[in-house]
Image (cartoon, grey):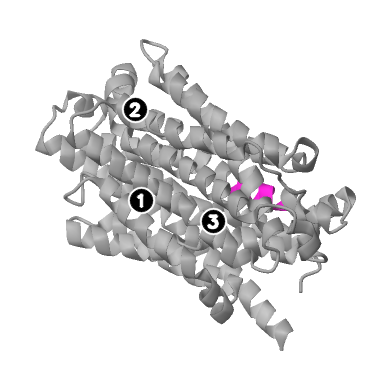
Amino acid sequence: MSSAAVKPAESVSTYNRKRLFLVSLLALFTAGVGASLRSNIADDLQRIFFDPIDKAHSAEMIGSVLGVPFLGYAFTIAIGSPLLDAIGMGVLLPMSGVLFIAGTLVILFASGPSAYTVIWSGAVITGIGWGLVETVINPLTTTLYPEEKTARLNTLHAWWPGGLIAGGLFGIWMGAMGQSWQVKLAAVMAPAALVIVLCTGVKFPPTERVSSGYSAGSMFRELSKPMFLVLFCSMFLTAASELAPGQWVDLALTRTVGMRGIWLLVYVSGLMFAMRHFAGPMVHKLSPIGLLWFSCLLASAGLFALSLANSQVTGLLAATVWGTGVCYMWPTMLATAAERFPRGGALLIGLMGTAGTLSINFVLPAMGKIFDAKKVQVAGGAAAFNALQPGPELERVLGIAAQASFRAVAILPALLLIVFGLIWAWDRRRAH
């Protein structure tokens, strides 16, 4: 038994675990729906608002809009996690639903020359709402299920891809019916409102750290542990391997794989939704670090394959490899930090999430810059690109640029093969 679970029965027996876990699933599902819908309407936002502003750099602009929710998330979870027990889970989780609705409304009313600033601001508000979700649900889950951290966190985070699937299918359905991007995006407000309703009248527990009697000082001292610093830095790369390509896939790969890229996101999300429910046996067989090593191997191979995919078959095969690779990364990284540093509580779990989402805010605009630079290079210069009219040649140029942006990201999980390989070997040596 971990030292963090001193009195699990007393600490959770008076709380409605099923309802608390349900609202946690729904909140993360809502965040996934929002992310999927933003990805789905990215092409509309670029074409309607950003191309008229600066066509040569519009991909960088949409990359910034898609990436900035992760920045809002990162700062929210970094600030909110150490204050979680002081403010209370019962305040922050319903507030996330309020901010999902508010951010969506801001984006829906964007227009005119200031549209980029308005859309960017709405995306930030949405990101703050998402940050509040993860500020609460990860420490809440480890508190409710102290002996099943890895398995329960993987089950919880299965509902992120569940939201991506729902949002992706809804966006495709609305598109087929000729509905506007506003109708698509507005759908996220329904589950957000349900989160607010389900939080009403339910009692939330203190975090595992508090219920186990660990002081706030001991929580902050965990920050100086060398292994935590290694995991913190690694989270930048594991998150970028999953979330940045996921936000970029519809905008970029639609031109190269012979179908809407959002179908690849839906397919990969389906894999993740199913596989995360079976994380327990994988962790038991390999250990969390061993699972992360194999995840990075497959993620790198899959991203490189996506950069070469040029048909529906090769696109699906590459997406399968990538999706299998990134499936367990996020929840297993959180669980590893929680298990190795139980005194760190919500602060360390929150900082892991901060690292992950900060990386997306940098990686997505970087992918946009690579995309923009490549499309101008292939076209023969900025003037030549701006002169291109819609047609086969423009699609060819944009397809090459899309592949280049995915190829650049493939190096990120490959770097972690060395890091996780060394930790895995060290753990096995200590075990013997």
Amino acid at pointer 1: Phe
Mark 1–mark 2 distance (CA, rounded to whole Å): 18 Å
Mark 3–mark 1 distance (CA, rounded to whole Å): 28 Å
- The reply to whether residue 82 is visible in this rendering is yes
Describe the element under mark 2 as helix, strand or loop.
Answer: helix
Q: Which residue position holds label 2?
A: 58
Residue 235: name its quadrant. Answer: bottom right
What residue sits 66% from the left and 36% below the top? 92
Could you classify mark 3 by the number of other residues whose Cα lies within 10 Å: few (under 14), some (14-19), or many (20 or more)?
A: many
Specify whether 298 is left or right of 131.
Answer: left
- What are the residue bounds of the magenta stretch? 348-356
Q: Residue 109 colored magenta?
A: no
Q: Nearer the viewer, residue 226 or 264?
A: 264
Q: Point out the tag, 2 or 3, that comes first from the N-terminus.
A: 2
Q: Which residue position holds label 3?
A: 156
* Disc on res. 173: none
Q: Which residue position holds label 1?
A: 406
Mark 2–mark 3 distance (CA, rounded to whole Å): 35 Å
Q: Is residue 199 above or below residue 140?
A: above
Specify whether 224 is left or right of 303.
Answer: right
